Amino acid sequence: MKALLHLTAVSLKLNFRNRMAVLYGYLFPLIFLIAFWTIYRSDPVPLALHVGQFLTVTILGSACFGLPTTIVSERERGVWRRYALAPVDRWIFVAGMLVSRAVLLLSAALLQLALAFALGLPMPAHPLGLLVALCVAAAAFLSFGLVIAMLVDNVPAVQALGQCIFLPMLMIGGVAVPLQSLPEWAQHISAFFPGRYAVEAMQLSATGSGLRGAGFDLLALLLMAAGAAIAATAMFRWDKALAPKRGWLFLALGMWLAVGAMAEMRGNVNISAAQDTRDVGTASNYAAASASAPSWENVTEADIDGIAFDRLPPDTGIVSPVSRSDETPDPVLEPSLDTIRDALPQWAPGNVADPVQRARNLLAIAAVPDILQMEQMERFIPRLVFARLQAMIPPRDLPKVLYWIAMHPDEGDDSAIRQLGALGLPEVSGPTKPVRGRIMLYAFKLLGRLTGHIATN
Amino acid sequence: MPSLIAVENLSHRHGDVQAIDGVNFEIAAGEIFGLLGPNGAGKTTALESVLGLIQPDQGRIEICGLGARTRQAREKIGAVLQATGLQDKITPREALNLFAAFYPAPIASGTLLERFGLTQKADSSYESLSGGQKQRLALALAFAGDPQVLLLDEPTTGLDPQIRREVQDHISGLKADGRAVLLSTHDMDEAARLCDRVAVIAQGRIVATGAPRALIAESGESLEETILRLTAR
């Protein structure tokens, strides 16, 4: 115990004396944080939806570079050859390295969070859960960092191998580039890397339902941690002159494969924008008869009864989701929802004279967050919009208006989707067709609720 | 006098090379025993086996009556190895305190800094030390656990003559303390000056053992010539 404490303390001291290590360990995570903040500057809540990502980048940097560089450079100098003579178990030396690295990593993560708070990130919904997820993710990555340290002979090789893991994980592992933006094939690949599980486990604690929803993520990370830890122990060497037992690498990588296979078997590897921007079809996919009425005022009950409400995407899915009435949003989302609720009465597009255009504009408030995959936001905003529509359009007219909008998704003006800034939402530019598709779906969904075709819950 | 190091029939192969082949020797308390021979003769393999760093293919090694690879044996050994160093930014005092934490009955860092003339440099970084200071620190670290047995692998190689003499004085001082010293060297003068007995090792086998004076007297040549003749391939 005395040896472990001394090793940890010395290792920390030496790290802080090494200017490059300090720069790399602390400045680099902050630069990544600023990058995320800049890229996602249009997010309604700064950085809130990227907590898992920026923390994972920090862990990844520490595991791919910080930890193995220290161990390999000490081994190259023969420090570990000297340690080998001491009457101390080898795991004490490794533990000293890991503990000091974990302290550095946690302090870098806290620094990152402090800057993020200063930039407007709200407190995580589940701070304790976030800490647990961070520790589990750190265990998975640092164990793999140990494997790298045991595998390679010199520091340049650490850099090379580290990059080979770091960059793909950032790009197609769901760490720097969000999973939703990746093509389907890359999402399948990402299931075999630890990155996405770390991101998801931490993100759920930051803005989601906490660790309860992160069971598989934590299991995946723990399995990967165990595989890498066993491999690193077996591959341990005091001296680079001793050949590493490379075969054990297959255990560490085999665990990645096993986790990926498990994820594929569970079948929810694709959470993609590939699915989410998918064409939702035309109105005729949902209504048996094509619209016969010449204007919205002539819509009949029979027209509405002809709609196949059961073909609509489920409320719990990711296409046009709607929260249950007894569900409460994460506290972190409440300020954003309040902003929308408070700004709605003054929002000009929501007050235009034509009731159809007015309703279409209001539905855009739900459609844009849905298309942007704003995680929890996209499920709670529709309820706000439905309430506003019921307040703004006479109950006799509302079903007809909604039917008309749903059956004519390409009609009318869509400039409202570029005026969402007043509500604290991103203003969408570019093609508006996907948004119109979602306006259609939400029109159907509210119509179904109003007419009793969809059970209100 | 009881032997503190006993090596019996030690053999080890590195791949295709028979590094050592049936090596035997014993070293008593208060004795400095030299292992002489050219590079690649098997000195380092023998030393590393005694240190427990390699598991020899064959043979028995005892340190103070304990198996070489046991923790208790390691508590009794101090060593200066080739190709060892320290982190650039660590100070001699920190290094000595760290190594003291590894042993049950360590010598205080202050005592060792003074004994090896490092008090002035106690709080300087390792990278700022001269070659001689680094080697003295290596010796001081070998003493951190107050060892009964010292293994020194070419401890004066690469040092300038003055520092070499200084380190040699430290080594000869160990006799008086009743410690057993195994010294590997290819410096004949050093062996003649320091060692009570030497073993000449060539191609993994011990080809001659005895007091340096006796070896010289036997052949009528200098120690260097004797060794060259014995280790000629």
Image: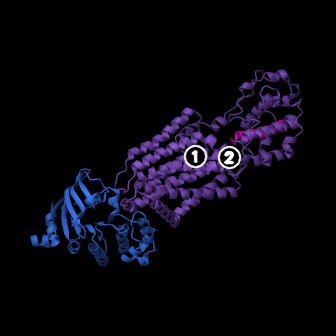
Chain colours: A purple, B blue
Across and down, in percent, residue A265 comes to 54, 32
For this orientation, the residue located farthest to the front is B1
Which residue appears at 40% of the width and 48% of the height?
A234
Is residue B106 located in the magenta-colored stretch of the structure?
A: no
Indicate the secondary structure of the residue bearing disc 2. Answer: helix
Front in this rendered view, residue A112 or B72: B72
Residue named by callout 1: A198
Q: What amino acid does circle 2 point to? A: Thr
Residue B17 to residue A190: above or below: below
Split into 4 quadrants, where in the image is the C terminus of chain A?
Answer: top right
Q: What amino acid does circle 1 point to? A: Ala
Which residue appears at 19% of the width and 59% of the height?
B24
Front in this rendered view, residue A101 or A311: A101
Residue named by callout 2: A207
Indicate the secondary structure of the residue bearing disc 1. Answer: helix
Find residue B206 and report its image quarter.
Answer: bottom left
Across and down, in percent, residue B81 comes to 32, 64
Q: Is residue A179 left or right of residue B17?
A: right
Residue A203 to residue A454: above or below: below
Find residue A103 and report its image quarter.
Answer: bottom right
Q: Is residue A311 left or right of residue B81?
A: right
Across and down, in percent, residue B153 comes to 29, 65
Is residue A364 located in the magenta-colored stretch of the structure?
A: yes
Circle 1 marks a residue in which chain? Answer: A
For the stretch drawn in magenta, the main secondary structure is: helix
Residue bounds of the magenta highlight = A357-375
Assess disc 2: are there few (<14), some (14-19) or many (≥20) residues with their C-alpha within 10 Å of its C-alpha: many
Circle 2 marks a residue in which chain? Answer: A
- N-terminal of the two: label 1 or label 2? 1
Q: Mark 1 vs mark 2: tell me if same chain.
A: yes
Which residue appears at 52% of the width and 38% of the height?
A260
